[in-house]
Amino acid sequence: MKKQRALLIIDMQIDFCPGGSLPVPKADLIIKPLNRYIAFFKSKKWPVVASRDWHPPITKHFKSSGGLWPEHCVARSKGAQFHPKLKLPSNVKIVSKGTTPIEDGYSAFDSRDQNKKKLSRLLKSLGVKEIFIGGLATDYCIRATALSAMKENFTVYFLKDASKGISAKTSQDAIKLMKEKGIEPIDFTKFRKITG
Ligand code: VGL
């Protein structure tokens, strides 16, 4: 099978965007760049995967049960929907994470599709070798996802022009750590060079 590439869009959900319950600053500014990557992957017929936080109303992930975060992305709620301006292809593969009361669900590699297939198995069954990661948030779910992807032996790129973090400091630290682990931060121009 030839070297297959996948776009992995992390948690572009209403609650993580301005106006949502856990907004990532300027998250709306990456919608356009993400749509450009999506259009490119679509034109090549390369798979597009979108992860989503999909929490129960009561979970250790939320402050109300001793966790770090305000309530967000409760399964089937409005805030858990993908941002309406994100142009996901009709054949997008959706994977959900943080679905039980005992999981945080930071890494998309802890997520499953509607058939309960884990992300790594899904990607491997599609022949994917290279993963391009963008979305939210650089310092939490992207960081965790990129590090898991390396452990699963994928080649991993971080789409720096299509991602935003919760805080500047922790995002810089996350990018530094990703680089140390061999995950290259790239923009669209570099992406086009890599993908020919
Ligand atoms: C995230 C904080 C809490 C993320 C999720 O998507 O990066 N951050 N839950």
Image (cartoon, rainbow, N blue to C red):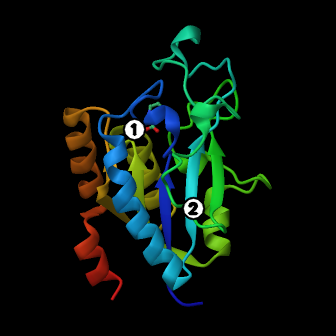
Which element type, helix, strand or loop, lies under badge 2? Answer: strand
Which mark is first along the chain, 2 or 1? Answer: 2
Residue tagged by mark 1? 140
Residue tagged by mark 2? 49
- Camera-side residue: 20 or 117? 20
Task: Classify 167 as above or below 189.
Answer: above
- Camera-side residue: 164 or 43? 43
Is 172 on the left or on the right of 122, as rendered?
left
Question: Is disc 2 surrounded by few (<14), some (14 to 19) or many (20+) residues within 10 Å?
Answer: many
Task: Classify 14 as above or below 149.
Answer: above
Q: Which mark lies nearer to you, 1 or 2? A: 2
Residue 188 at least partly seen? yes
**The label number, if any, that marks residue 57 in the structure image:** none
Q: Looking at numbered disc 2 in the image, what kind of residue is underneath it?
A: Val
Is 12 on the left or on the right of 176, as rendered?
right
Find residue 56 and report its image quarter. Answer: top right
Q: Position of residue 187 (x, y in %)?
A: 25, 66
Residue drawn at x 33%, y 89% as measured from the top left: 196
